[in-house]
């Protein structure tokens, strides 16, 4: 397999330093009994819990693609899925501290609600990989970078909006691990985009045609609309939209893409009432 030279992320160290995000030293029960989160924040946490917990299903699909041929990438993905799993567990504790059902029961319900989508997802991803050939990995890495950037921004913005000391501490810890994921995806994406004009063209095309906020294919559309509107609309959200687009557009070939702004426009008018 062809690989370009500069390898800046030491995946072995990354894997060896992985550990579950720590939450057991935070007294979540007492903290949220004393000051419960707002209904809006809880709705965002449910989304985040569901999607963090869905990572292993994304991993299932990704292992069917060209990406599985690169052992550095599979070492990263193994570790990435492990860390994301624990983000889901930590967020489940927040929901449970509010008397909500979370963890396995909620995750099983989310997966079974996917129905046919759950069967088609792996086939579509595999087909994409077959068509893109080895440049699929560039799509995967760039897609991963914008997903991780936007996830980290979501946590930062939720902490900012809610201003709850214990929630902020937990989300800060999760964000530090998301930063490790960002470092890998963005470095690998840059390397591949720099090396191949075909990859630049293909990634730009794929993001333009297919990218949507992480989790939007898993949860009902009113949930994605709510999350986008709550976290990215208004003055505080505007700064994050700009920042996210700037980050993505610093990657080779992604200049002027305006992806996050486009998604904001798409989701800001979608109704957020929960379907009966
Ligand atoms: Fe995560
Ligand atoms: Fe992550």
Image (spheres, rainbow, N blue to C red):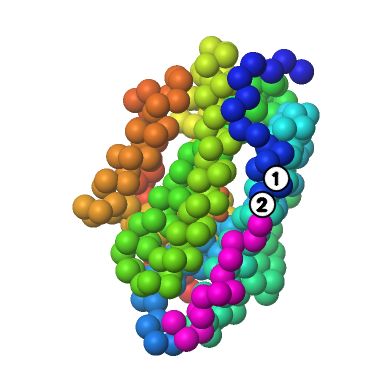
Pick whichever, 25 or 249, lies toward us. Answer: 25
Residue ID at (59%, 74%): 24
Instruction: Say if residue 171 shows up in the picture.
Output: yes
> Percent x, y for residue 177?
55, 51
Residue at 67%, 74% in the rendered image: 105
Q: Label 1 crowding class (10 Å Cα cut-off): few <14, some 14-19, many 20+?
A: some
Indicate the position of residue 218 as horizontal and vertical percent values: 58, 55
31 sits to left or right of 82: left
**Residue 211 at x, y = what percent?**
50, 38
In the rendered image, residue 241 lying in the magenta stretch gets the answer: no
Q: Is residue 62 above or below residue 164?
A: above
Closer to us: 146 or 76: 76
Which SS class for mark 2? loop
Which residue is rendered at x = 56% and y = 70% of the image? 23
* Label 1 element class: helix
User: Outermost residue toward the left?
Assistant: 235
Residue 212 in sight here: no
**Residue 55 location, x and y as percent?**
65, 53
- The magenta segment is 18-32
Q: CA distance from mark 1 to mark 2?
A: 5 Å
Q: Nearer the viewer, residue 61 or 169?
A: 169
**Residue tagged 1:** 15
Vertical position of residue 43 compared to residue 221: above or below: below
- In the image, the residue with mark 2 has its CB under 8 Å from the nearest atom of ligand 2: no
The residue that label 2 is drawn on is 18
Q: Quadrant of the N terminus?
A: top right
Main secondary structure found in the magenta portion: loop
Disc 1, disc 2: CB below 8 Å? Answer: yes
């Amino acid at each position: 397999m062809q690989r370009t030279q500069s390898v800046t992320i030491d995946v072995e160290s990354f894997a060896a330093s992985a550990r579950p995000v720590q939450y057991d030293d935070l007294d979540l029960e007492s903290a949220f009994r004393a000051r419960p989160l707002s209904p809006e924040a809880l709705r965002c946490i449910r989304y985040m819990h569901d999607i963090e917990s869905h990572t292993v299903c994304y991993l299932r699909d990704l292992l069917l693609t060209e990406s599985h041929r690169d052992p550095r990438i599979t070492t990263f993905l193994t570790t990435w899925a492990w860390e994301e799993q624990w983000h889901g567990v930590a967020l489940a504790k927040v929901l449970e501290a509010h008397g909500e059902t979370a963890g396995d029961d909620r995750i099983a319900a989310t997966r079974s609600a996917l129905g046919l989508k759950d069967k088609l997802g792996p086939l579509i991803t595999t087909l994409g990989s077959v068509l893109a050939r080895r440049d699929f990995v560039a799509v995967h890495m760039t897609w991963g970078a914008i997903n991780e950037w936007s996830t980290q921004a979501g946590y930062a913005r939720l902490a900012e909006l809610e201003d709850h000391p214990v929630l902020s501490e937990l989300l800060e810890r999760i964000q530090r691990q998301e930063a490790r994921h960002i470092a890998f995806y963005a470095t690998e994406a840059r390397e591949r985009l720099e090396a191949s004009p075909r990859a630049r063209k293909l990634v730009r095309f794929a993001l333009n045609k297919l990218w949507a906020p992480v989790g939007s294919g898993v949860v009902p559309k009113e949930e994605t609309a709510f999350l986008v509107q709550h976290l990215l609309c208004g003055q505080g959200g505007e700064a994050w939209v700009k920042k996210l687009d700037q980050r993505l557009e610093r990657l080779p070939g992604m200049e002027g893409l305006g992806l996050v702004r486009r998604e904001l426009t798409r989701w800001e008018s979608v109704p957020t009432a929960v379907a009966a």
